[in-house]
Amino acid sequence: MKASAFAYARATDVENALELLAAHGENARVLSGGQSLLPAMNLRLITPKLVVDIGDLAELRGVVVKGDVLTIGALTRHGDLLKSPEIASHAPLLREAVAHVAHPAIRNRGTIGGSLAQADPASELPACMLTLNATIVARGPAGERRIAAHEFFTGIYETALMPQELLVAVELPIPAKDLTHFFHEFSRRHGDYAILGLAAQALVKNDQFTDLSLGFFAIGDRPLLASSAGKLVGVVVTSAILSDACAALDAEVDPLEDQQATPAMRRHLAKVLLRRCVSSLLGRPDLRSGGPA
Ligand code: FAD
């Protein structure tokens, strides 16, 4: 299919993009890499009257370290994240996750801002934002505002962004050097959208977690920062404690049914991933088996 007729404007700078969005409101859509917007328009799932192309706005592209904050411009492409030395050294979890986003052709066009604004619950990057305690920076008619990642994703393809706002950047706190991470997703083929995935980061001292963030994706209508992680922090993790954490995880998830999996299968996979994650981060192969609770 082809998109319905629409007007096109190439923004000359951020102010110009904001003026266009303010003038056209819900009738306008921002175009970044186009890897989600254009398929949706071609299928006529969305029919904007105006497409505002921000692809030329170099000021929104790039990765910068300032003090203890890593700032990623919204137009930074997935492929750029993979090549960035700053991402490799300060956000290795993100780097590992991006390698699972689609395929090189899509990673060469798709952007981090587009991925977060799209808010597909099966996407890797929104879950990473929760795990990494990111702040989403948005600019609109009233100026700039910062939104904590855990308040940004509000439903399937829904975010806290207003139609007149532009996502301009993502800020990540630079973590202590000895943080470790775990990333795994179940998918039919590498590069497919996940059936279920987990992006985790932890601080381990004396064989115990002193901090643990578990960001699940494809688990519900939005990514989930699992509070059941709390059961595993500050204790010597035993098989019984891990089973308890698995039960708590089961109680806090609300998986969706789609063509890839039933809710029961997603519940099962979430617990399998939690066991693998804990076993891997603590270097405890004994915790991997035992099956999901
Ligand atoms: P666009 O397509 O340009 O925009 C997406 C949406 O976000 C639109 O509604 C647009 O208006 C809005 N938007 C874009 N930028 C901004 C901004 N700065 N401010 C406000 N709103 C904005 N993604 C995954 O995460 N995992 C996958 O496994 C995966 N597989 C894919 C497989 C295929 C075959 C394809 C075509 C895509 C896949 N994607 C996957 C999606 C891909 O990662 C997209 O790049 C990403 O979802 C959107 O980025 P984009 O820059 O192309 O955004």
Image (tube, grey):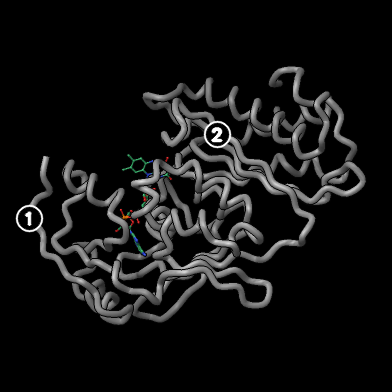
Q: Position of residue 261 (x, y in %)?
A: 45, 23
Q: Nearer the viewer, residue 89 or 139?
A: 89
Q: Residue at x 83, y 24 (%)?
A: 286
Foreground label between 2 and 1: 2
| In this rendering, position of residue 244 left or right of residue 83 | right
Q: Quadrant of residue 48?
A: bottom left
Q: Which mark is residue 5?
A: 1
Q: Quadrant of residue 133?
A: bottom right
Q: Residue at x 60, y 68 (%)?
A: 70
In this view, 38 is above or below 9: above
Quadrant containing the C terminus in the rendered view:
top right
| In this rendering, position of residue 221 left or right of residue 226 | left
Instruction: Give whichever of discs 2 and 1 has the lower sequence position.
Output: 1
Farthest residue toward the top? Answer: 290
Q: Which mark is residue 185?
A: 2
**Helix, strand or loop at disc 2?**
strand
